[in-house]
Image (spheres, grey):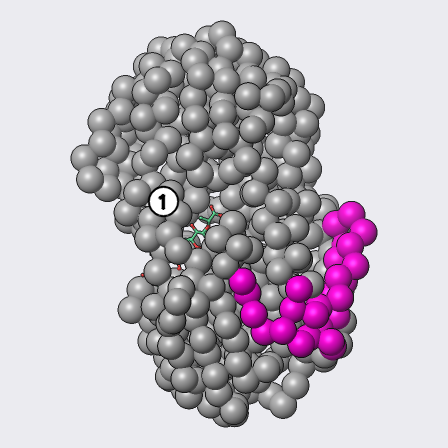
């Protein structure tokens, strides 16, 4: 297993290009299942999760051609609507094939994704929505079986805001008979990006980005081209890295538009952040103070502070001046990075879904263990400011969701390298 070795104390400076969004690319790859014509995608990030999803689609009969950040998928020969356990267990987002397969093939057998480090991650809302659209859905031997002659438009109300639940049901509704309305829909920008891709394929969708999405089913979808939106969580991660190190960096190919809640909190902590726009590109400039002020946050569905940024923000509160209260309202177990940060000398107390963080003057390098994707990023940020050497182990989590993060950080002046653990 690989690890990262980080020598702390470098202020980040320079420019970093932000990659395409993992959490937009994953549902959009699955959208290819809805059409017999090719879907051409640009700005697809080079991540392990993307590779896993492409393998999953290929074993269903989808032809995949990949050239750097460009991917073309052709589901004309789709002949195996099955997502097997050995592939799904490595990536929960595989559940996103359930809606498209049921809509296109009238059946699907998808392994239950099971939980992960941050929570139980049930998919009951995905199932409930497909049943409301007329599918017969059972769960047997760890697999979700869905069967239907033709999905019917329905009025769906999810019990809680669910991002992939909204995405699965929106994709399924594109080929249903009649109109589907999803109430309490997720408003995340990645849902909007998926809706834009589906619309380019001929879907009739309105309301994406609000909590009520209306989809008028059509007989079939055609091929299209689409460019994946920038990754707002990678953007936020680099903003936090610059903030923690008192750095000054420019992030290109991204904008503050998808991250107002995070930008506001970073500005409250004392950072100067400005968006830059030219005719052809957008970027963000961040200048951080010598020492940040601690800022409290509470995660919640978009447009509130994203749960995927909680771990990274905890790392900067660990070295900020003052104390902060951090409340995690989305997942039941998303503080595992806290015990690792404490190994670096952080002052954190956890009480249920609330973390009380008091900033310390310095962290000290140590060996720590990554437990999930965003926890890995949190430990790297802490390592960048800790005195001495920090070894972050089990970084296979990191490779799932960050494209070449150590080379991007090295280019910004960080002393970080990959080694065999
Ligand atoms: C998506 O996960 C993201 N993943 C997650 O990013 C992100 O943390 C999460 O949304 C919240 O923003 C992708 O988009 C691939 P949810 P998802 O369904 O859709 C409960 C990362 O780091 N729930 O919005 O699985 C669920 O347990 C990953 O990139 C049900 O109870 O999350 C959670 O408490 C981590 N039943 C809450 O809803 C359901 O059927 C929100 O989950 C569905 C969800």
Residue 333: image location, x then y, percent: 30, 43
Work out which residue is located at the far left of the displayed protein and give it.
Answer: 351
Work out which residue is located at the far front of the displayed protein and give it.
Answer: 141
Q: Is residue 91 above or below residue 76?
A: above
User: Can residue 47 be seen in this snapshot?
Assistant: yes
- The reply to whether the residue tagged 1 has its Cβ within 8 angstroms of ligand 1 is yes
Foreground pick, 26 / 329: 26
Residue bearing mark 1: 118
Queried whether the magenta region covers residue 280, the answer comes back as no
Q: Residue at x 38, y 77 (%)?
A: 138
Crowding around mark 1 (Cα neighbors within 10 Å: few <14, some 14 to 19, many 20+) is some
Residue 171: image location, x then y, percent: 54, 74
Rendered-image quadrant of the N terminus: top right
Q: Residue at x 48, y 83 (%)?
A: 147
Queried whether the magenta region covers residue 76, the answer comes back as yes
For ligand 1, give the image quadrant.
bottom left
| Left or right of residue 398: residue 80 | right
State the extent of the magenta-drawn residues as a range. 59-84
Q: Is residue 355 above or below residue 118?
A: above
Residue 409: image location, x then y, percent: 62, 25
Rendered-image quadrant of the C terminus: top right
Query: Mark 1 falls on what kind of element?
Result: loop
Q: Residue at x 65, y 69 (%)?
A: 60
Q: How many marks?
A: 1
| Left or right of residue 290: residue 314 | left
Foreground pick, 26 / 201: 26
């Amino acid at each position: 297993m690989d690890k990262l070795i980080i020598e702390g104390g470098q202020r980040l400076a320079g420019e970093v290009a932000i990659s395409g969004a993992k959490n937009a690319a994953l549902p959009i790859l699955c959208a290819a299942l809805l059409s017999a014509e090719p879907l051409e995608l640009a700005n697809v990030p080079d991540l392990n999760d993307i590779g896993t999803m492409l393998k999953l689609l290929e074993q269903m009969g989808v032809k995949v051609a990949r050239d750097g950040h460009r991917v073309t998928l052709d589901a004309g020969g789709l002949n195996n609507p099955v997502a097997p356990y050995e592939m799904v267990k490595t990536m929960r987002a595989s559940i996103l094939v359930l809606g498209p397969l049921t809509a296109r093939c009238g059946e699907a057998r998808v392994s239950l994704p099971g939980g992960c480090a941050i929570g139980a991650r049930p998919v009951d809302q995905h199932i409930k929505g497909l049943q409301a659209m007329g599918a017969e859905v059972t769960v047997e031997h760890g697999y979700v079986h869905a069967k239907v002659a033709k999905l019917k438009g329905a009025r769906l109300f999810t019990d809680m805001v669910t991002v992939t639940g909204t995405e699965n049901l929106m994709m399924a509704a594109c080929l249903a008979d009649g109109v589907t309305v999803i109430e309490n829909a997720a408003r995340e920008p990645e849902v909007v990006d998926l809706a834009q891709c589906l619309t380019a394929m001929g879907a009739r969708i309105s309301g994406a980005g609000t909590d009520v999405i209306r989809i008028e089913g059509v007989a079939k979808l055609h091929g299209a081209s689409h460019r994946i939106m920038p990754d707002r969580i990678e953007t936020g991660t680099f903003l936090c890295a610059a903030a923690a190190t008192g750095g000054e960096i420019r992030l290109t190919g991204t904008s503050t538009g998808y991250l107002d809640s995070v930008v506001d909190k970073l500005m409250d902590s004392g950072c100067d952040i400005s968006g830059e726009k030219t005719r052809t590109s957008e970027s963000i400039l961040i200048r951080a103070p010598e020492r940040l002020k601690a800022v409290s946050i509470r995660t919640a569905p978009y447009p509130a502070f994203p749960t995927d940024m909680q771990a990274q923000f905890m790392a900067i509160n660990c070295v900020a001046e003052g104390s902060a209260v951090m409340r995690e309202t989305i997942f039941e177990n998303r503080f595992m990075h806290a015990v690792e940060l404490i190994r670096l000398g952080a002052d954190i107390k956890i009480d249920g879904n609330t973390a009380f963080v008091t900033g310390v003057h310095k962290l000290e390098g140590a060996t720590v263990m990554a437990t999930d994707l965003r926890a890995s990023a949190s430990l790297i940020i802490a390592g960048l400011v800790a005195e001495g050497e920090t070894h972050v182990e089990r970084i296979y989590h990191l490779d799932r969701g960050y494209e070449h993060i150590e080379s991007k950080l090295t280019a910004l002046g960080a002393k970080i390298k990959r080694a065999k653990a």
